[in-house]
Structure formats: C-alpha cells, structure tokens
Amino acid sequence: MTDLGFTPDSIDTGKPHPARMYDYYLGGQDNYEVDRAAAERMMALTPDVRISARANRAFLQRVVRSLAEAGVDQFIDVGTGIPTSPNTHEIAHSVNPDARVAYIDNDPIVSVYAGAKLTSATNTGFFLADLRDPEAVIEHADLRGLIDFDRPAALMLVSVMHFVDDDADPAGIIAVLTGALAPGSRLVISHATADFHSSDISEEGAAIYRQATARLSLRSREEILPLFGNFELEEPGLVQTPFWRPTGEVPAEQRSVASYAGVGIRN
C-alpha cells in the first residue's frame, strides 16, 4: 500500500535534507552532493554524529524486536525517513510475519523512496501525512484500514521530534497522536540532545541544519521526559540511546552519543 502523489523530479536537491544527511551518516547512497557537504561539516564539527546516527539505528532495531517479542504486533513509525534495511517491518516480521507496520512521513523524497522499497512488503503501508498535523495523521483513512486502534500498538517517534520546534508544541502533538491508542500500547522516542557537547558545538550544529529543509531543536533529558505524558517509562527509563537494553557491552566510542531513548507503556 502506498500513498505517494510525488515524482522524483519534484524533489528539491538545492538544500541539504535531514533524511538524506541521515542516510549519508548511515553509509547509504540515497543522498546528493549538497547533503554530503552538510553532513561532512557536521562530522567535522562533532565526529561522533555518525556514531550517534548508527547507534540510533541500532536502537530502532532493538526496540522493534523487543516489542515484537513482547507481543506487540502493530507499529506506527512516524517520521520514518528514507527506508534503510533492516527497517521496522523487516525486524517485526522476523519475529511475527503477521505484524502490521505503518510508515508515515510528510516529505516527497521519503514518499518516492518508500514507494520504491516498500510496495512489495506484506502487512506494510506508507502514508503521506505531517506529524505537525497530528489529527490528520491519526485519522488517515488508510492508516485506519491497516492499524486496529482497539488493540495495542507501538507509536514510534525515532529521531524525529528534534525537528519539531517548541512553538509547534511537541508534547501536545504527541498527546494527540497517542490519544487514540489502546491500553498496552507503547510510545517509543529517541531524541537528539546537547547534554554531551559544549554549547558552541551545539549552536554551530543547529546553524548547519538551519540551512537545511528542517531545523534542529536539541533538548535536554529534563525537556524530553515530559514528551512521554501519561505513559509509564519501562526499564531502563530514558537513557543514552546505546544504553537502552544493549545486547552486549556498550563500546567506549558510543558513550558520548548525543541522544536519549526510551519506551513508555499505557497502562
């Protein structure tokens, strides 16, 4: 299932794009020179940005597997970005082939790549909608056709809320998105932070993203915690991304990863 409405020639390659920069951090090829140049400036400023991106990707894979093994069989991945394998549906289906996965993003380039990479996946859909219009997201007819909101689902906001300014009320957006979720549902958040870098580095990094198609709003742990609203954080709480249920010892190079991650449950 797809809901595209865009063609490759509608993609603006004149400005860096956060999804394409992220793809470059991960070693992907779905990016352009303008994205690579901006990403290289970020990596020169703070070399662990690539480590942070890969740690975030590893978190996504761990959390989907963990939730699927715990019995969650519906996933709503909002702000998914350019599909990178293994993605949410691949991890979920490796545990439960009947799991249903909805990808949602508002960006034309993501819709194009999603159309190319997700159309053959079973129990999987991509739907074009904007996180900043949460009512439109949660009431999307095709989303409602795939996800049963009378049963628990996992709402995944992985590496996306830091592209929502305070003026847009990120906590209010999440409250609307989660309002329709049944008891037993999970809220998954990973979020970039300035807690582990100097203010100069954080400001210079934010300036690079101000030249891109989406600005970066770095938040502290204390600012991220309220985003979980009335969801109760599961162990180990809100922690640096590599420390969320690692499968082994966390390498020393990942101990300065500049993002937090956590999972909350609706009781």
Image (spheres, rainbow, N blue to C red):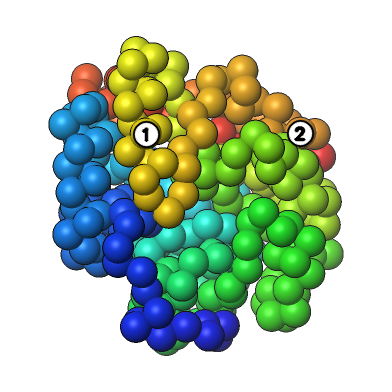
Where's residue 76, x and y in %?
A: 61, 61
Amino acid type at circle 2 is Gly
**Residue displayed at 24% across by 46% down:** 38
Amino acid type at circle 1 is Ala
Looking at this view, is 115 or 244 the one in front? 115
**Residue displayed at 58% across by 73% down:** 128
Where's residue 1, x and y in %?
A: 55, 85
Q: Answer left or right for 236 relative to 85.
A: right
Q: Answer left or right for 206 relative to 122.
A: left
Q: Is residue 105 above or below residue 189?
A: below
Where's residue 159, x and y in %?
A: 47, 44
**Crowd around label 1: few <14 · some 14–19 · many ≥20 (10 Å):** few
Q: Which residue is mark 1?
A: 207
**Crowd around label 2: few <14 · some 14–19 · many ≥20 (10 Å):** some
Query: Earlier along the polypeptide chain: callout 2 or callout 1?
Result: 1
Q: Secondary structure at mark 1?
A: helix
| Residue 92 in sight from this viewpoint | no
Q: Answer left or right for 66 relative to 41.
A: right
Q: Which mark is residue 248?
A: none
Q: Which residue is mark 2?
A: 229
Where's residue 151, x and y in %?
A: 78, 62
Q: Answer left or right for 33 relative to 21.
A: left
**Residue displayed at 64% across by 56% down:** 131
